[in-house]
Each structure stands twice: as C-alpha cells, then as structure tokens.
Amino acid sequence: MTGFSSRTVLPFAFLLLTACGAPPAPPAGRAAPAPVPRTEVYRIVESYWDAYLALNPLQATAAGEHQFDDRIGTPLSVEHLANSLALERRALHDLLAVPEASLDAETRLTYELFRRQREQAIEGFTYPAELLPVNPFDSLPQRFALLGSGGGAQPFATEKDYENWLARIEDYRRWTDQAIANMREGLRRGYSLPRGLVERTLPQLESLGEDTDVNVFYQPLRTMPHSIAERARAQLARRFAEAVKTRLLPSYRELHDFLKSEYLPRARAGLALSELPLGQAWYAYLVKRSTATALTPAEIHSTGLAQVESLRGRMQAFLAETAFPGNLAGYIAYLRSDPHGRFASGEELLAAYRDLKSRAAQAVPASFAPPAVADYEIRSVPHGCEAAFPAAFYQGAALQAGRLAIVYVNATDLQVTPAYALETRSLNLGVPGHHLQRAIQLVREARPRFRRFAVFPGFSEGWGAYAASLGEELGFYKDPTTRFGALLAEMHAAAALVVDTGLHAKGWSRRQALDYLEAHTAMDETEAGAAVDRYSALPAASLAAGIGELAIRAIRQHAQQQLGAGFDTRAFHTELLEGGALPLDMLEAKMARWVQARP
C-alpha cells in the first residue's frame, strides 16, 4: 500500500529556502567553477527528497528516516499545498537548467525519471483531492491505526519513541479538524464522496474510536520495552493512556459523528469520479499516473474486454482438461462448497503463507539470479485493524532503520481467503513478486533516494501479477484448484480494467458493475460490492496490475522472439528488475536496448 497523504496522486514536500537556496557568491575576480552535470543532478534530487520528507513526516517514517516521527504535518492545508507546488516547480526548474545531453546513461535515467515525476506532480495539483480525504480503503484514519498498533513503521522501542507518538497524536487531532473543514468545503463546491463509501467508513471509525481494552491504540502499552526505566515506564504509561483516551479516540468519534450526521445526508448517490467538477480530466490523469502509459480509458476498457474473453476460453479449456462435468459457474460453486478449501483458523492461514514463502525461496533460483536481499516477515493485521485492510498486503522495508518488509495477512474473515487463492497471493506479494522487486530496488544505495523508494504502479503492481503468473514455471499450481485460482486472479485483474473504466468513464451503474463481476469472476455479491466500492474510492488504482502485467509479458515475448535460443530467463529478469521501478514506456525502451546489445 502506498503513501499516507490524502492526496495520493502525488508526493508533497516543502523547499526550505534557507537550506536549499543559492550558494554564496565566489570571491571577486574569480569565476565559480561550473558544476559537474552529474553531481548537480544528484544534488537537486537529494535536496528535493530532504524537503519532501520535511513536509511529509509520515512518508519519512515509512522510509525509515525517523527525524520527524513526532509529527504529521498539515497535508490538507492550503499552506501545505502551496508550499508543495512551489517545491515541485522549483525542483523542475533547477533540473531543466542542467544540460541533459552531457549526462551519462545512468544519470540521464535519473534525470528523466525525476523530470517526469515533477511534471506529473504539478499536473496533479489541478485536482482537489484534499477535499476528499477519507475513504474506507486507503486513508489516514486506517493507516494511523496501523502505525499506532506498534506493528507498523512507527517505532516503539525507546522512551523517545513513545514521546514522539504522543506528539503525533496531537497532530492527528489537527488533521481531523482540517479534514472536516475540507469536507465541508467540498460539499459547498460540489465535491462529495459516494454515499456507499461513507457508509462503509462509519463502522471502521466507530470501532477505532471505542474506548475498550482491546482497542488497537492501547497495544503499545502492553508491549512497552523493559529497557525503559521503571519510573519512566509508569509515568509514560499514564500519559500514553490519557492521550489515547482523551485526545486520539475522541478524534475518531468526532470524524465518525460528522460523517454520519452532517456529511452522509449530502453524499452523492453515484460512484463515478467523472460526476464531479473536472471529473473526466481527473480520471484521465489518474489513469495516466496509475498505468504509466498513454492509454486512454476507452482503450483500457477494450483491452479488458478482450482479456476477459481470452481468459474465459482458457478457463473452458481447463474444465475440459480436468473433465469436470459442469460449467464454470458449477466449478466455482464446487470450490466454494469444498470443506478443504478454507482455513480452520488464522494460525493455520499464517502457517500456510510461511510454508509457501519457504517453497518460493527454494524455487526462484531456477528463473531468477537475484542479489542477496533482506528477508521479509509474515504477520497478521493487528487486532482491531482488520476491517480497514484487505486480505493481504505488502509493506516495504526500511533497512537503515532495521525494519524488515512485511506481508500482512488479514486472518479474521477466513471466508475471503480460499485455499486455492493462496499460492497466487503469496507469489504476488512475496518472492518473486513485490518483495523481490522492492528489495532489489532498495539495496541500490548508490542511487538517489527518490529512486530507491519510487513506486510506479504500472510497473510494481504489474510485476506482482506477472510474478504470480510464473507459478507453473516455478513448480507451483500443481493442484487443479490452485491452477484455477491463478486463472481467477488474472480474471479479476482483467475484469477490473473493464469495471473501473466502465464506472468512471462510461457511465456504468453500480448494478452493471456488480453484474459484470459476478458473471465473470468467482465473487459473490458481497465480494463484488466491496470490489466496486474499492474501484469507486480509488479511481484507476486497479488498472495498474492488469496493464502492467500485459506490458511485461509483451516485453518478454519480444525478447524471446528476437533472441530465440539465446533467450535466458534469469538474465531477462535480472535486467528487468535491475533499474528499479520505471514507467512502462521507459521499461520497454530499456529492455529493447538490452535485447539489441545481447550477442
């Protein structure tokens, strides 16, 4: 999952002019030496990253830089937006002053990536995402709960860590006040959330705001390290409990009550972003950002329809091969009713993920030659946060801070985690999927930090889906049900291309979207309803996996055609991952050069 800011379409930062301004003039009569272009590019992008973290403390925590752990900042304020836009423009201006033609290949790639990110960020300020700061799938209230559980990126190891969290609670109160003010302004200007999203958010906020012993925000009290002196522990525990009880939980209740009594009656009935002012252009922008392609919503819709039909053919061939006596609907019903197709407990589910992790580690050397990368953990979503998070998700590492990557597993609702889907999810999120890609990117310490932590969804989500599709190559999907589970995962990604664009660009109703998902996937109406609400809450986000996987597969097919018997899977994957996350067109050009250079 990415980003903590409500404006998830772009990064924010503030250029501290006193720190990043012009250098002092050289002594009279002596010309200042011209900066080396490569060094100048590095200085610009590193200065930007420092300023970005200063205005985005939660992003700094996620990256393992803990100098701002005591604050959130003001990401929804007009001042923050103005400062952020100023930073983007200043950084782009400084970069364009560097002569690109004089750069070596690696620095030119950094230059192009940074330029593209800044241009895209500046364009994103056209759209008022700060007026829609809450949703039930990925917004600060859910992420703050994960941080506050002690099971996320926020450290709770020292007395200073606990003091930082107490200060951060105060910033969260200010964030809540700003979020409410922004949503009132949104209602005034015609920017409101769909009613269904508000209704889905309310029970999450109600649960997180309940003052009970099992509330997730009290968890760090139960795990306070004994390395903290006893007297300090007692005082800290008292202040911590008081801050949670009297400051933090009331903020959740205040937001809940505002949404229920004031906002919900005025929320809109429709689901599409295109219903809002600037909505069509906003959606087109998000499509471009998510897929990192020039594809239009209409082209993606057509691509999705074709993919769905192709996958239906593969599923029919699967049924013929397995000699199942019924049709696709019958086979899905059989999977749902199979008593061996569900896990009996959360512990059994976690054990299955850990077993698959071990199997994947033994299998990947056949198709990958990765460098030594850090391990990752498998953890259950902290108790009390389950309703706010999906079946499983990946959180990247912060190695400098000693924090491993984590695959979080939602082990509460076992009905949404069928056994036949587990191999696909494990390969997608762990190795060789998200973890392998992100770990290789992270260890490239000579590269600027913005590249080591960059996420281009078309690449990263597409890589996860592509990695899962390699299951048979890696010795997985030997059981017919897991083979079908892999096909279903591909079908879900293809159907998302159709439904997301159908909702936001083609005027589909909720009923049309539900009917399409129920007809072409294994989702029942409840699961399809959650998927439709996710597409509505996070427009275009679901497009990245399907479009990215298709692009990576096309790149591989081209390489195989050009190299013939000389194609080496391990070398191909090494080259694909070596450059880190890239926009798909830049990835295609990079891999084309690699193919041309092969003997």
Image (cartoon, rainbow, N blue to C red):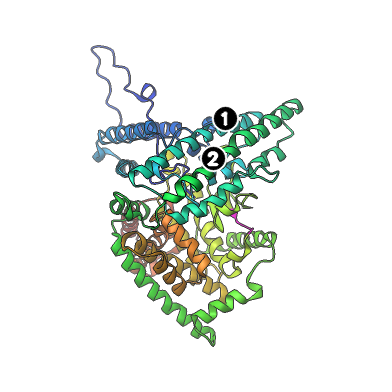
Q: Is residue 331 magenta?
A: no
What's the residue at 36%, 62% (across, down)?
Answer: 503
In percent of width and height, residue 190 lies at 34, 47
Quadrant hosting residue 516? bottom left
- Which type of secondary structure does the marked residue at label 1 adopt? helix
Q: Which residue is mark 1?
A: 167
Does 310 sit above or below residue 69? below
Three-letter code for the amino acid on which mark 1 is drawn: Ala
Quadrant hosting residue 33? top left
At label 2, counting other C-alpha atoms closer than 10 Å, the crowd grade (few under 14, some 14-19, many 20 or more) is: some
Residue 233 visible to the viewer: yes
In percent of width and height, residue 28 lies at 25, 11
32 relative to 376 in the view: left or right: left
What's the residue at 49%, 85% (across, down)?
Answer: 320
Quadrant hosting residue 26? top left
Give the magenta-colored segment's residue range.
408-412
Does 203 sit above or below residue 450? below
At label 1, counting other C-alpha atoms closer than 10 Å, the crowd grade (few under 14, some 14-19, many 20 or more) is: some
Three-letter code for the amino acid on which mark 2 is drawn: Glu
**C-alpha separation, residue under disc 1 versus residue under disc 2:** 19 Å
Identify the main secondary structure in magenta: loop
In percent of width and height, residue 235 lies at 71, 27
Residue 590 visible to the viewer: no
What's the residue at 32%, 53% (across, down)?
Answer: 288
Q: Quadrant of the C terminus?
A: bottom left
Q: Which dot marks residue 254?
A: 2
